[in-house]
Image: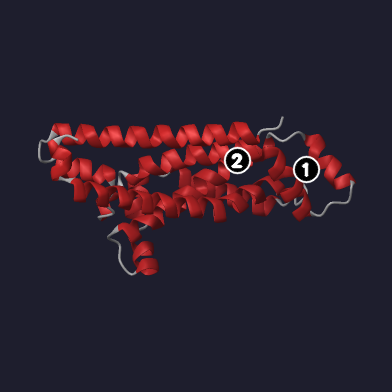
Amino acid sequence: MPEILVQYEAEILRAIGETFAMVGVSILAAILVGLPVGTLLFLCRKGKMLENRFVFSTLNLLVNITRSFPFLLLVVFLIPFTRFIIGTAIGTAAATVPLSIIAIAHYSRLVEQSLLDVPKGVMEAAISMGASVREVVFKFLYVEARSGLVLGLTTSIISFISYSTIMGVVGGGGIGDFAIRYGYQQFKTDLMIYMIIIMVILVQLIQFIGTTVSRMIDKR
């Protein structure tokens, strides 16, 4: 192991832990809130089971606005809200608030697209058999779209890792913040490069796992 990595081993491990914490909370938000929001967007579209123009238009607008915000500006814009929720606007816990919000918007759109890719005949067959909305969603739509949902989540996780590198602005820490403070600002280019390599390996590993799982569960 290079000497400089040994020298900063404790700081590097803490930065990796902070990144995992921020991304982990974002993944939970994406699954627990983004998945239902994306499903509701799909179901409330014109011609779908829960067709509701108002609900669809409202959710669609909120998702579009959130996704169109430059992430750095979104972090700054949400500081008062973050302080209200967490009690502080600084630190790893505070950083999870804007990350979770962008995670929900990001994944909900991918969920909607995955469900739109399900053949219309699947939903029509489910309805003709008298399936309830819950049954249509969990026993038909999610089953048919499971491969796309996993790939969408994989893509989202990689985006969350990228977003987490910005959280040094609010003292969120993480690998990106460490690379800037200890590598770039202190002119230790080799340290910054090692951090980039760690990020690349992490992203490649997540992409490999996501693609593998998606291929395994894709029965089409």
Q: Residue at x 27, y 44 (%)?
A: 175
Can the viewer see residue 167? yes
Give the x, y percent position of residue 81. Answer: 38, 63
Q: Position of residue 108 (x, y in %)?
A: 56, 46
Q: Amino acid at mark 1?
A: Gly
Give the vertical position of 10 relative to 187 (above or below): below
What residue is shown at x 45% (from left), y 49% (from top)?
102
Amino acid at circle 2: Leu
Residue 10 in the image: state x and y as whole percent.
20, 51
Alpha carbon separation for disc pair 1 and 2: 22 Å
For label 1, the crowd category at 10 Å Cα-Cα, with few meaning under 14, some 14 to 19 and many 20 or more, is few
Discs 1, 2 touching: Cβ within 8 Å: no
| Residue 45 appears anywhere in the view | no
Secondary structure at numbered mark 2: helix
Give the left or right position of residue 81, taking residue 55 as reference.
Answer: left
Report the residue marked by disc 2: 149
Give whichever of 158, 2 is nearer the camera.
2
* Rendered residue at 63%/49% (across/down): 57
Label at residue 47: 1
| Badge count | 2
Residue 68 in which image quadrant: top left
Image location of residue 16, percent across then percent down: 30, 47
Label ID, residue 150: none
Q: Quadrant of residue 94?
A: bottom left
Q: Secondary structure at mark 1?
A: loop
Name which of mark 1 and mark 2 comes first in the sequence. Answer: 1
